[in-house]
Image (spheres, rainbow, N blue to C red):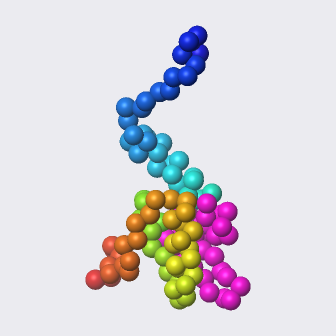
Amino acid sequence: MEAGKEDLVCRFKNYLYRLKQSPRQWYKQFESFMIQIGYRRDEHDCCVYSRVFDDGHMIILMLYVYDMLIACRDMSKIKEFKRMLSLEFDVKDLRFAKKIQGMGD
């Protein structure tokens, strides 16, 4: 550090999402959050998380890049999960999936 420049900060020319390692860092943060709130990552697919609740309901989350699909029979569990997710990440709820790419017609 140069004398007299201790109070200066750097301004990046590239935004974080433009960096090569950004997707990996985002995924690591997401995975840490999911494990912290009681979800487990599928041993065969690192983009699938699940949690079984005491009442027997299960949430399954499928992640594709920055998009996710959440499935559960209990809508209140999905709403609570979305609330928790929004406290940690900047999310946009696109509501119900009408079509899942590559699955059927």
Tell me if 48 is positioned left or right of 37 in this view: left
Q: What is the x, y in percent for residue 66? A: 43, 60
Q: What is the x, y in percent for residue 9? A: 50, 26
Tell me if 105 is positioned left or right of 44 in this view: left
Start-end of magenta stretch: 33-62
Tell me if 2 is positioned left or right of 92 in this view: right
Residue closer to the observer: 102 or 51: 51
Farthest residue, direction left: 105
- Residue drawn at point x = 44 percent, y = 63 percent: 91
Q: What is the x, y in percent for residue 4? A: 56, 12
Asked if residue 46 lies in the magenta stretch, the reply is yes
- Residue drawn at point x = 51 percent, y = 65 percent: 86
Q: What is the x, y in percent for residue 41? A: 61, 66
Q: Is residue 60 above or below residue 2?
A: below
Q: In which quadrant will I find the C terminus?
A: bottom left
Q: In which quadrant will I find the N terminus?
A: top right
Tell me if 44 is positioned left or right of 18 in this view: right
Farthest residue, direction right: 54
Residue closer to the observer: 63 or 2: 2
